[in-house]
Image (tube, rainbow, N blue to C red):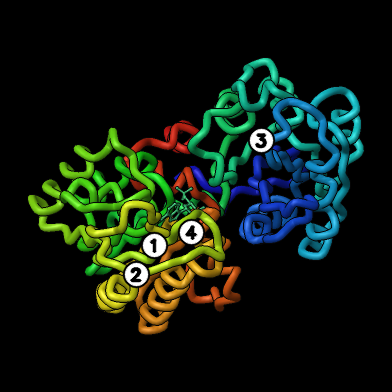
Amino acid sequence: MNSIENINFNGQNVLVRVDFNVPLNSDYEITDYSRIVQTIPTIKKVVESGGRAILISHLGRPKGKINPNLSLIKLIPYLKKHLNYKITFIDNCIGEEVKNSIKNLKNKEILLLENLRFYKEESNGDISFSKKLAELAEIYINDAFGTSHRKHSSTFYVAKFFKDNRYIGLLIKKEIERLNKILITGKKPITVILGGSKISTKIDVIDNLIKKVDNIIIGGGMAYTFSKALGGEIGNSMIEKTKINLAKNLIDKAKKFKCNLSLPVDSINSISFTNDSETYSSSISSIKKNFIGMDIGLKTRLKYDKIILNSKTILWNGPMGVFEFDKFSKGTEFIIKSVLKATEKGAYSLIGGGDSIAAIKKYNFKTNLLNISTGGGAMLKFLEGSKLDVIDEILSD
Ligand code: AMP
């Protein structure tokens, strides 16, 4: 792997594409720092060996406009707490002023540049923008796993200007090793728990995993399309009508490959999509006309608990229900507890996706035994068996 462990960066300007796209609350305050924490080893590696680290990242979706609420300057206090090196910030990411700041940078110093997405060129994959970024350094490292499923200027096209001097960072290396533990080297039985809203975003993942893992557990909104495919009455629950046949095909394919595709047997239903509504529990195949399936039921939780506790390798992506409403978060909470119990017994567990991580945080569960991925979309793309071009391009050297 074209990784950085044995590279000496002494005296070099190193452009490091990190993923500092941390979650923010409605007041634009940072609610979780794990993406930054997981990038620290790569930054340390550059500066410890005498390099000058120039950090670039995006934050949120400013859509090509300057938005002070999304300035990366807010990360500086946190970075200073975790990196014992001089760190400065400049409110642009390209141009003469940035170049001058870099000229003044000394070995073992860090410069954080402003949000890349203040330029629309970043998301458009604009080559001339990539070239301007490339002019800032002699070496390029990509450690932004969370955006590695997107071919943006600072992730894909910029690497083309560093043909002999480009690397993947320690976090990307770790993320790929973690995912390969699920797909290739993991101890059996391997169980993948998939939830969330739509089946359409996870069909290709399920299709690929059927051939590779022992159990696939389904929860969340997509369970109701599966129920409909089996002839169930699902009331007003979330449904993707155009995917019913695909759901049927997946059920058949799982049988063919002897993969246990496990579907909910019962559901907690609500008269409206709110937290304080009338609810009742029923079989997932006989939900009353006006009711919406909001969470997996008690029987399903116990059924899934057994499978999870019997697993040696576990991946979880996506909540089991509308966990944002306390009333419908119990299924997700139960499954997190099962994963934790299995992990305490020795299973390897990898968790991905913003909602799953938010759910773990919501209940203040101890996460030290769990492996928390920094990638949601990138993780799903990898699990689909699709190439992550941004990473493959660098690894092809
Ligand atoms: P995704 O982005 O596909 O991972 O979906 C996450 C979202 O799925 C969360 O906001 C959940 O509230 C939502 N979700 C989970 N279960 C259901 C359900 N039964 N009906 C509607 N939405 C759901």
Q: Is residue 40 left or right of residue 306?
A: right
Q: Note whether residue 318 is visible.
A: yes
Say the numbered circle drawn on residue 35: none
Say the numbered circle drawn on residue 322: 4
Q: Amino acid at mark 2?
A: Ser
Mark 1: which secondary structure? strand
Residues at marks 1 and 2, CA–CA distance in whole angstroms: 6 Å
Q: Is residue 111 left or right of residue 19?
A: right
Nearer the observer, disc 1 or disc 4?
Answer: 1
Q: Earlier in the sequence, mark 3 or mark 2?
A: 3
Q: Is residue 291 left or right of residue 322?
A: left
Residues at marks 1 and 3, CA–CA distance in whole angstroms: 55 Å
Residues at marks 1 and 4, CA–CA distance in whole angstroms: 11 Å
| Residue 55 sits in quarter | top right
Q: Are marks 1 and 2 in contact (CB under 8 Å)?
A: yes
Report the residue marked by disc 2. Answer: 281
Q: Amino acid at mark 3?
A: Ile
